[in-house]
Image (cartoon, grey):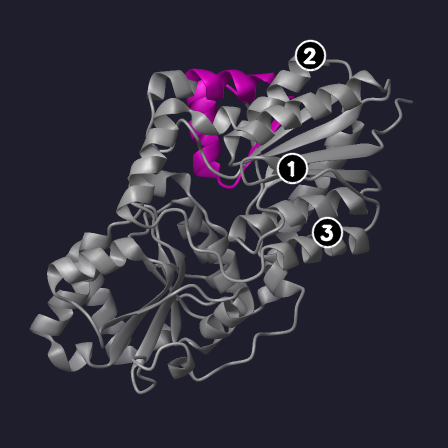
Amino acid sequence: MTPRLREAWFLTSELESERASSFRQERWCRIFLEAGATLRIFNLRGAFDHSDAVCTDAEALAAFRREGLARYRGPQASVREGVHVRALRRLKHLLLADLYLPNVIKLYRRLDELLGARSEPVMLMASSPPFSVAVVGALIKRRHPDKVVFAVDMRDAWALHNALGGIKAIKRAIECRVLRRADRVTTVSKGLADEFQAHYGVEVGVMYNVATHYLDVPPAPRIDLREVNPQIDPARAVLVYTGSTPEHHYDLAAIVGAVARLKRERPALAQRLQLVFVGACDEVRREAQAQGVGAPEIVFVSHLPHATARSVQASATALLFLAHHGPNNLGVVSTKLFEYLCLGQPVLPLDLCECSDVDVLLRRYCGASINAHGEQAIAALLAGVAEQGPAVLPRLGNVQRVRELLEDYRRHAEELLKAR
């Protein structure tokens, strides 16, 4: 009988932050620990450093997270905001600069050194983005093929991402070689899995972003939303979005235009609603200014600590889910959907394609979904909420139901640790 792999090495970034992506990474770490593996975390820190931490149980992992959060205490501004930042991001993608940052090179050398000094194989999982850790993993797999079971968890596309710049042919060639080098590839949705399979001919498993960080903690206390912005009107139905709105991801012109249309054509109904955007929502702000829409119809709140953001979500009338703009919503299923479902709050999806992953998940767990595209349809949807209230929106009654999706993680982890 072939012995199981005893160590799981995890390559990532953001695990020492409160960004939404960190919770999927933490979930994988916990799953490997539950499976009996010793966990070794290589977490990129900025451009020059990375962690090298060994965790043998859940408490050690929690301590690693606590220390990381303390090191980077406070809400962190999104790197997506500002004209200069957007220009630098485009230059970064054009030059592929994230693939050869100093700590990426250091990480490769460290892994090569460790594997060169041992005979026992390990399971190596790269959680991308950043795609640089997947490139490192592929290079290590090529150099030590008999010592590494290599897995890639693609939380998002890299070369296939329509909103990221760079020379697509070069990036796709790199992405293809990396994913084909992997023994196993997973991603966050069936739509994205189909994309990878169609372009690169690789088999991809799907692990949805179950928001266990919302299920495994006490419910967030409700607050008076005027505490985060006095312009929020508790007499209105408050529709809250939390997160960021990166450039070219969402149909913001139609969403803001719908609010303007409702105010223009049915002002009495418009006075019953208020859209609140929390976080890095610079693109929404610019669109609202361009269309002449502002408070009290649309209100903005800057970055909040994670605990406060959860309380804002819990205190909203309903939560806005902005679907990625494109055919089949480009297969994007964000952690945000599961955060909303796990709160048991009504969900108001905008620009959601029928039969997309999110649409299927809403119908599966809430019994209903909504497909409203374009300014006119979204305005009619908002009017319906103003007239009938949040009862017309999808809502998950038994939030524990989504735990069943964690079994996919457990099965995959077991297969990886047996893959000799």
Residue 102 horizontal side relative to residue 299, left or right: right
Real-space CA distance between mark 1 and mark 3, rounded to the nearest whole angstrom:
13 Å
Which is closer to the viewer, label 1 or label 2?
1
Span colored in magenta? 173-202
Real-space CA distance between mark 3 and mark 2, rounded to the nearest whole angstrom:
30 Å
Asked if residue 371 shows in the view, the reply is no
Residue 331 horizontal side relative to residue 9, left or right: left
Q: Quadrant of residue 377?
A: bottom left
Q: Quadrant of residue 346?
A: bottom left
Residue 147, above or below 26: above
Asked if residue 190 shows in the view, the reply is yes
**Residue type indicated by callout 2:** Arg
As helix, strand or loop, the secondary structure at mark 3 comes to helix
Circles 1 and 2: CB atoms closer than 8 Å: no
Image quarter where the C terminus lies is: top right
Which is closer to the viewer, label 1 or label 3?
1
Real-space CA distance between mark 1 and mark 2, rounded to the nearest whole angstrom:
21 Å
Image quarter where the N terminus lies is: top right
Residue denoted by label 1: 50
Residue 160, above or below 300: above
Where is residue 57? Give x, y as percent.
Answer: 83, 50
Closer to us: 203 or 293: 293
Residue denoted by label 3: 64
**Residue type indicated by callout 1:** His
Residue 108, above or below 33: above
Residue at the location (57% across, 75% down)?
220
Residue denoted by label 2: 143
**Residue type indicated by callout 3:** Phe
Where is residue 288? Give x, y as percent.
Answer: 19, 61
Where is residue 305? Give x, y as percent.
Answer: 52, 66
As helix, strand or loop, the secondary structure at mark 2 comes to helix
